Structures are given as C-alpha cells and as structure tokens.
Image (cartoon, rainbow, N blue to C red):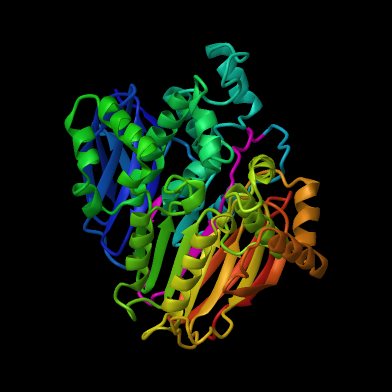
C-alpha cells in the first residue's frame, strides 16, 4: 500500500482550480477529493527512486473554503489519523477582492518540539499555530517564500549525524549535502515539521530559490564559479540542487495550464523514471542559464506578482555583469508592462533587496567597479576577495541591472493606468525594513518620465527562522546613518561610480527577529503589517501602517 511520505502542499489556487503536491512511498494514483465535490487525480512520476504527484483540482467554487482529503490508490492518507489540526482547505479568493500576501525568507529547519531551538521561535510555526487555534483568525491568501527554503550548506546537527552515517564527512563537501538523496533529507526535515506541514497544506505558496538552496553566495562572480567548477563535488551538488528545486518548489509555482504545456513535466510524467530527463535539464540550466526560466507570474485578482530569479539568471562576465540575462530582463519588462490598468498592485519578488542601506549600496557598486578593472589589476584582485568575504552581490553589485529595474519601475508607476503601488518584496539580509525611492528630475537629454503616480517601496523581511548575529544588527543600523552615507560616497568616488538615478530613504525599521510581513490589498489600498515570533508562541505586531490611501 502506498504511504504519504511528504505533503500535501497546496501550491497554486485561483477561483476555480488548484494544485496539490505530494510525495508517495511507491508508484500510485494520487487523488484529491474536496467536500464540495471538486476533485483531481493523477499518477505519480519517479525521480531518483522517489515518487511524486502534482494533483490538478478543477471545479472549485469561487469565494469558498473547501476541506479536502488526499487518497493514494483509493486509501485516504490525509488528514493524518488523530491529527490535532483542523481540516486542510482549499480557499478560493474572496468575492470582495481582498488579497492577503504574507512573505519572508531564510527558514532554517526548526528542531523537534521538545528540543532547544538555538535561533528562537519559528515565525511560520507560530503563524500555523495561530490559524489552527482560531478558525476565524486572519489567514494569508498566499505565502510567498523568497529563498533559502532549505540550507544545503548549513545543516542541522540531526542532519549532520544522518550524513555521517551515510558517507565520510571528512571528504568534500563535508557536512553540506552532496546529492539528490541528501537534498530530500533537507525537505523532509523542513516540511515534516507538524505545524509547517499543516500550514503548507492549507495556505497556497509561491517559492523562489536563493543562494543557500544551493550554496552560500551562489553565482557571486565568474571567478567564484570557475573555482567551484574546479572542485570534484560541485557538479553533483548544483545538479542535485536544481533537480530537487524543480521537483519540490518550481512545479508548484505553475498553473495547471502552464503544467499541461511544459515539455519537461510531460516528459517526466510519460517515462517510468524521469531522472535522466530531469538531470539533462539541470545540466542545461547550469551550463547555459539563459535556456531556462525559473521566474514566473501569478495573478490574484487585480494583484500581479512577478517572481524574479535573482540567482541562476545572472550574467557573470565582469565587463557585462547583469542580475538578469537579456531574455529574463525582457520577460520581466513584458510582464510588468502588459495590459496597463489591469492590476492595482504590482509585486516584484526578488530574493535580494533592490534598495539597501546607502553604505552597503555604495560599497557593492564600488566593489563591482574595482572588479571590472577601473583601478587596475591589484585593486581588481582585492575587489574579488572582498566581494566573496562580505557577500557584496545584491542588485547594487550589478549597477546596470539596478538602473534597469529603477527605469522599469518608474515607467510602470508613471504610465497610463499606473497601479496604486509597486512593491519590491525581498529577504536575504536577516532583518526587515521599508525603503522609499524618489526619482529626481532628469536632464532634458534623458528619456522623459512623467510624474510618479504609484507608491513605490522596497519591503524587505527576513529571517523567518534563523540567527541574527550582532554584526548584522550593528552593521545595518550603522549602514543607514548619515556618517555611513558619507563614507559610502567616498567609496563610490574612488571607484568612479556614477550616482544612482534614484534616491531613497528608510521609512521603517530596521527590525530584527524571526518575522513575517503581510500585505493586505483591497482595491487600490494597501496595508503592511510586520509580526515577530515570540517565545510564548504568539506573533507580536511591531509595525502596521497604510501604504496607499484607503
């Protein structure tokens, strides 16, 4: 009899359809049956000895919350027997058009409930407990996870012991994961957490990777990549990382229609074992990233979410560095500008913040200039070492891409039918803040841009569950100061860096803790709430404010 190994995860959901992801113990038929009669069924597919299904559910009633059960070969496997959690539901959007988007990043797997948690309470665990305790509690319509869903290079003590029983940890890659099977261990550890398992079964989720899903500072530079490719273990790590990401995270980001047209998904489904097809795809994605698109679009009524790949889509040639390859950049532009007036809020999800504290921005721009050779070979060598040591690889480290994103946002926000808000959602930096840009008047020779009609904000929130070292607290507090801004400008002058086309200021934060931000979007109004997990099992609101007029 087939058993349920992992899941269910409610991934895609719109007014009438949804997808539910599961891993089973053997090949079988997976089925989802809803209380209102909607249902879906599909056969599992196999990758590296594991059996998965993404069940499309059709016929849902808009504006409802419908409990569902999961069956494998006709046997009910979810809800779990004697579960203390309420039934999992598929919630279709409210008729009044309100959309609640909760987001964050950087979730290190929580230990067992009776074990000491070295990094404090988990914000997602706490959110799950609140919703489970009170059926009337506000719940997100979608959970946006902006990277580092698993940590392939910073495993828990329990996983380290498991790895030691499997292979010699004194051999590279040491205590980091080495292959697909070890990646599955990370997902089991993270997603079998009882609160997380239930939360992901009842709240739809959108995901995108960041560096720790593969390795710290993944794709920092061409020199970094060359060094990694020279190691004997890197190829298996990166291929396994991409394969496991495709299975566990990427597939669920797609709509049923997109899945039905995806040639790789169809090929994996049509073969008894899809490992070779998926591995060949991962090889192409690694050697020629421009051939693969991990970015995607999701619409929630009149809210448009564009999730952007800020890692694998990079161009690393020092003379032509770009956060997004040309095809990816054009995709983002097309999706943002498509059907002006058809959405009230544009959310751009990018794991790495676009707007950083001024000192950090200028340091990254300066370092990029050094590495490009503006100050000679010795400074270029120093710049590469500094880039790796200090993690100088955000949007500011790709100056042309920073400006292209600024120009695109200005174009969206000043055009006909401009949305009420353009909000850049990010994580990565283990604290939270709000920053607001302004576009100074441009010279007459520049392409004209009309007055900005949209509220534009950088909203950064992390970690969901991870450590916050003292140097992060002190460094980012100082990074926003006037003294730091002056120091940053001196670095920029030394690197011959042009001034950014936008100016920005911090309007909220910095906040430190395990935390989540939630946007409540209704019509052209937007509200922000930041909540932090407390030791007593509650989420405390530390900031709540309107972003646009009600």
106 in magenta: yes
Question: In x, y percent, where is residue 178?
Answer: 50, 23
In this view, the residue in front, 2 or 188, is 188
When the figure is inspected, residue 139 is found, relative to residue 282, above or below; the finding is below
Q: Residue furthest left?
A: 270
Q: Residue at x 42, y 57 (%)?
A: 307
- Quadrant of the image occupied by residue 131: bottom right
Image coordinates of residue 393 in percent, x first then y, are: 59, 49
Q: Is residue 139 visible?
A: no
Rendered location of residue 247, percent (x, y) = 36, 37
Q: Is residue 268 visible?
A: yes
Quadrant assignment, res 112 = top right
Horizontal relation, residue 145 to residue 93: left or right: right
Q: Is residue 46 above or below residue 411?
A: above
On the image, the x and y values in percent for residue 66 come to 34, 57
Task: Please identify the dominant SS of the magenta region.
Answer: loop
Q: From the viewer's perspective, is residue 425 above or below residue 152?
A: below
Q: Residue at x 24, y 40 (%)?
A: 265
The residue stretch that appears in magenta:
87-113
Q: Quadrant of the N terminus?
A: top left
- Asked if residue 219 lies in the magenta stretch, the reply is no
In front: 480, or 365? 365
The residue that appears at 76% across and 67% down in the rendered structure is 485
């Amino acid at each position: 009899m087939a058993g349920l190994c992992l899941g269910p995860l409610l991934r895609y959901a719109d007014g009438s359809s949804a997808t539910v992801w599961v891993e089973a113990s053997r090949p079988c038929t997976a089925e989802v049956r809803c209380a209102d009669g909607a249902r879906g069924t599909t056969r599992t597919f196999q990758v590296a000895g594991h059996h998965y299904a993404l069940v499309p559910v059709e016929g849902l009633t808009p504006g409802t919350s419908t409990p569902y059960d999961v069956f494998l070969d006709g046997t009910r496997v979810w809800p779990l027997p004697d579960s203390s959690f309420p039934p999992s539901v598929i919630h279709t959007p409210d008729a009044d058009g309100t959309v609640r988007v909760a987001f964050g990043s950087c979730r290190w797997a929580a230990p067992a409930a009776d074990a000491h948690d070295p990094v404090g309470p988990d914000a997602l665990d706490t959110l799950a407990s609140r919703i489970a305790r009170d059926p009337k509690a506000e719940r997100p319509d979608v959970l946006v996870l902006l990277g580092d869903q698993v940590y392939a290079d910073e495993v828990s003590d329990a996983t380290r012991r498991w790895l030691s029983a499997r292979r010699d940890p004194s051999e590279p890659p040491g205590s980091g994961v080495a292959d697909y099977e070890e990646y599955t261990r990370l997902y089991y550890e993270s997603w079998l957490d009882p609160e997380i398992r239930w939360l992901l079964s009842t709240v739809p989720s959108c995901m995108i990777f960041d560096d720790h899903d593969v390795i710290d500072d993944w794709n920092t530079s061409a020199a970094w990549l060359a060094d990694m490719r020279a190691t004997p273990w890197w190829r298996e790590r990166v291929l396994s990382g991409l394969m496991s990401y495709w299975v566990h995270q990427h597939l669920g980001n797609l709509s049923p229609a997109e899945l039905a047209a995806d040639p790789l998904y169809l090929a994996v489904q049509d073969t008894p074992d899809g490992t070779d097809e998926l591995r060949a795809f991962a090889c192409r994605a690694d050697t020629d990233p421009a051939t693969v698109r991990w970015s995607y679009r999701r619409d929630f009524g009149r809210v448009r979410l564009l999730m952007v790949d800020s890692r694998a889509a990079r161009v690393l040639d020092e003379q032509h560095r770009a956060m997004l390859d040309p095809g990816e950049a054009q995709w983002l532009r097309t999706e943002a500008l498509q059907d002006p007036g058809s959405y009230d809020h544009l959310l751009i999800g990018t794991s790495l913040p676009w707007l950083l504290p001024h000192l950090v921005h200028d340091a990254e721009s300066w370092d990029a200039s050094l590495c490009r050779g503006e100050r000679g070979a010795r400074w270029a060598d120093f710049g590469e070492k500094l880039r790796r040591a200090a993690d100088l690889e955000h949007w500011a480290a790709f100056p042309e891409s920073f400006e292209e994103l600024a120009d695109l946002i200005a174009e969206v926000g000043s055009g006909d039918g401009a949305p009420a808000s353009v909000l850049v959602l990010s994580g990565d930096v283990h604290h939270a803040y709000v920053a607001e840009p302004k576009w100074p008047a441009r010279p007459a020779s520049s392409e004209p841009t009309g007055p900005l009609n949209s509220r534009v904000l950088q909203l950064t929130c992390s970690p969901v569950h991870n450590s916050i070292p003292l140097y992060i607290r002190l460094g980012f507090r100082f990074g926003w100061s006037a003294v730091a801004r002056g120091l940053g400008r001196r670095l920029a002058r030394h690197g011959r860096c042009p001034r950014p086309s936008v100016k920005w200021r911090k309007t909220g934060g910095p906040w430190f803790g395990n935390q989540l931000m939630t946007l409540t979007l209704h019509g052209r109004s937007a509200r922000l709430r930041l909540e932090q997990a407390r030791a007593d099992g509650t989420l405390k609101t530390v900031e709540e404010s309107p972003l646009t007029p009600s």
